[in-house]
Amino acid sequence: MNIKEKATILHYHRHREETFEKGSTRALGWKNDHSQQVRYEMLVDIGDLNGCSVLDPGCGYGDFLSYLDERFNQVDYTGLDLVPEFLEEAAHQYAKRKNCRFYLGDFSRIALPRVDYVLASGAFGYKTEDLTYVVRCIDRFYRTAEKGIAFNMLEREKFPDHPLLTGHRRDEVMAFCNTICPRVECIDGYLEDDFTVFMHKS
């Protein structure tokens, strides 16, 4: 993802923060709270996350951390995002929460921490001219995870054309994932235009 594309993403979310309530799912670009929650439900089905370390690339306001804390015990959480305003809000909201940290950066480039799971919701939704971007990021996530990764994507055939967001071809994504992981699953049917991929290391 190049500098211009990153700047477009920053502009998009800053505009949404001005249009919608800061800290809301609408400011993040989600349609509503329901779609965000349903995606989280799919991601955590990858395994038992009690006592595990989790990396949340594209973490936004850290909403996924609240979801994890409601369902699992002693999750060690790391959130990573490009948008400083998101991280400021997240750091404020979770200031008293132990074993939790937020970093500003591009997850396709910076060094990633070793964790049990990488769980990415909406991380691959933005358009880019880099045709290798998605597969490189999936490979990076897979290499830094000890137990596995889960991510969701908009489905190309079902998602309408959008100036900033994009869908992906499920068969192409699965074909790549199967080249680097012996156990890959795909879940769909939970939302009209979305699918989730699990890549298990054991």
Image (spheres, rainbow, N blue to C red):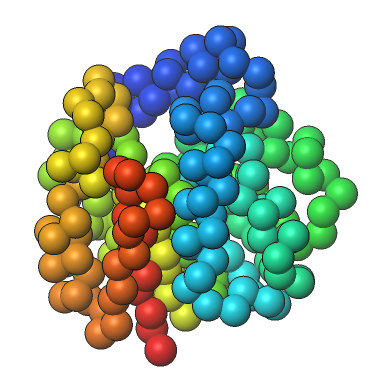
Residue 120 left/right relative to 98: left
Pick the residue in front: 71 or 151. 71
Q: Position of residue 36 (x, y in %)?
A: 52, 43
Residue 49 left/right relative to 147: right
> Looking at the rendering, in which quadrant would you find the C terminus?
bottom left
Residue farthest right in this picture: 96
Residue, x 33% and y 44% (percent of image)? 192
Asked if residue 198 is positioned above or below residue 120 in the image, the reply reads below
Q: How many labels does the image show?
A: 0
Asked if residue 133 is positioned above or below residue 173 in the image, the reply reads above
Q: Where is residue 198 in the image (x, y as percent from the top left)?
A: 37, 70
Asked if residue 45 is positioned above or below residue 121 in the image, the reply reads below
Residue, x 36% and y 28% (percent of image)? 6
Q: Where is residue 158 in the image (x, y as percent from the top left)?
A: 21, 40
Pick the residue in front: 191 or 113. 191
Residue, x 38% and y 79% (percent of image)? 200
- From where the camera sits, is residue 141 visible? no
Pick the residue in front: 151 or 76. 151
> Looking at the rendering, in which quadrant would you find the N terminus?
top left
